[in-house]
Amino acid sequence: MPDTPHVVSDVMTRTVVAVGREAPFKEIVQTMEQWKVSAMPVLEGEGRVVGVVSEADLLPKEEFRDSDPSLFEQRRRLSDVAKAGAVTAEELMSTPAITVHPDATLAQAARIMAVRHVKRLPVVDDIGMLQGVVSRADLLKVFLRPDEEIEEEVRRTVVSYLFPAFSHAIHVNVHEGVVTLRGHIHDTSLISVAVRLVRAVEGVVDVEPQLTGESAGRDGTGTTR
């Protein structure tokens, strides 16, 4: 079977820029600019994540700087109007923070980011203590795997597993992350299974099955395809 998938702790950044609840507005902006980040965890105590402050939380200050929102806009954008008058991280932050655990798979982290429309996730342990931060760029690191490494894993964990008697006759080629499978197999019903397993190998961009063989009938006989 395919190897154990990478998890968030494999790719996350462990040195994290964060602020406390009482951090003032200007300090938050300066810290973001200094470290070139668009969002930061807000911590309390020994490092428990209580929220996240992002550029989006800071922008209402500028948006409403020289104008007063109408009553309709105040009701429609209550949170943004409140943040326009905020001066500390506690008043600005989005809470509860959207976080992920270190043992979550990269696919799970990517799904959280997509559904919640965020670019970075604080990584926390079971009691909410900050362990690191994972970004979209971190999740894409698996696609930096060398083609040779992907090819070896496909041969070892998919081809040898599904086609032990035919593995010598199946050729695996990987170019720019695209895996091509060529050869003759006993049961063509396994092609879809092979494609699914190869796609699960981290770093695989696409799969091109070029396999031929036999399709097993109900009576156990095979017909050549």
Image (cartoon, grey):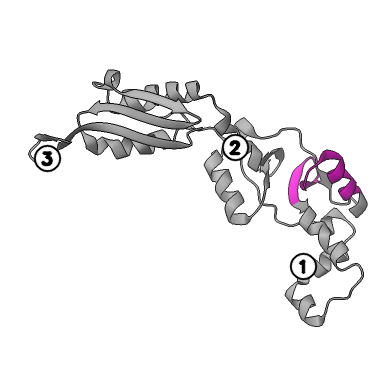
For the residues marked 1 and 2, what is the alpha-carbon distance in whole angstroms?
A: 33 Å
Q: Nearer the viewer, residue 214 or 42?
A: 214
Q: Does 36 appear in magenta?
A: yes
- Sooner in the amino-acid sequence: mark 3 or mark 1: 1
Q: Position of residue 95 (x, y in %)?
A: 72, 57
Residue at the spot 80% in from the left edge and 43% down from the top edge: 18
For badge 1, the amino acid type reads: Ser
For the residues marked 3 and 2, what is the alpha-carbon distance in whole angstroms?
A: 42 Å
Is residue 163 among what the camera can see? yes
Q: Residue furthest bottom?
A: 71
The quadrant where residue 105 appears: top right
Q: Position of residue 42 (x, y in %)?
A: 79, 48
For the residues marked 3 and 1, what is the alpha-carbon distance in whole angstroms?
A: 63 Å
Q: Residue furthest top?
A: 168
Q: Secondary structure at mark 2?
A: helix
Of the 4 image quadrants, the one containing the C terminus is top left
Where 124 falls versus 75 (above or below)?
Answer: above
Tell me the residue that label 3 is attached to.
217
Neighbour tally class for label 3: few under 14, some 14-19, many 20 plus, Cα within 10 Å: few
Neighbour tally class for label 2: few under 14, some 14-19, many 20 plus, Cα within 10 Å: few
Tell me the residue that label 1 is attached to.
79
Residue range corresponding to the magenta coloring: 27-51
Tell me the residue that label 2 is attached to.
140
For badge 2, the amino acid type reads: Leu
Residue at the spot 84% in from the left edge and 76% down from the top edge: 69
Q: In the visual, does 105 lie left or right of 135?
A: left
- Sooner in the amino-acid sequence: mark 1 or mark 2: 1
Nearest to viewer (mark 3 / mark 1): 3
Neighbour tally class for label 1: few under 14, some 14-19, many 20 plus, Cα within 10 Å: some
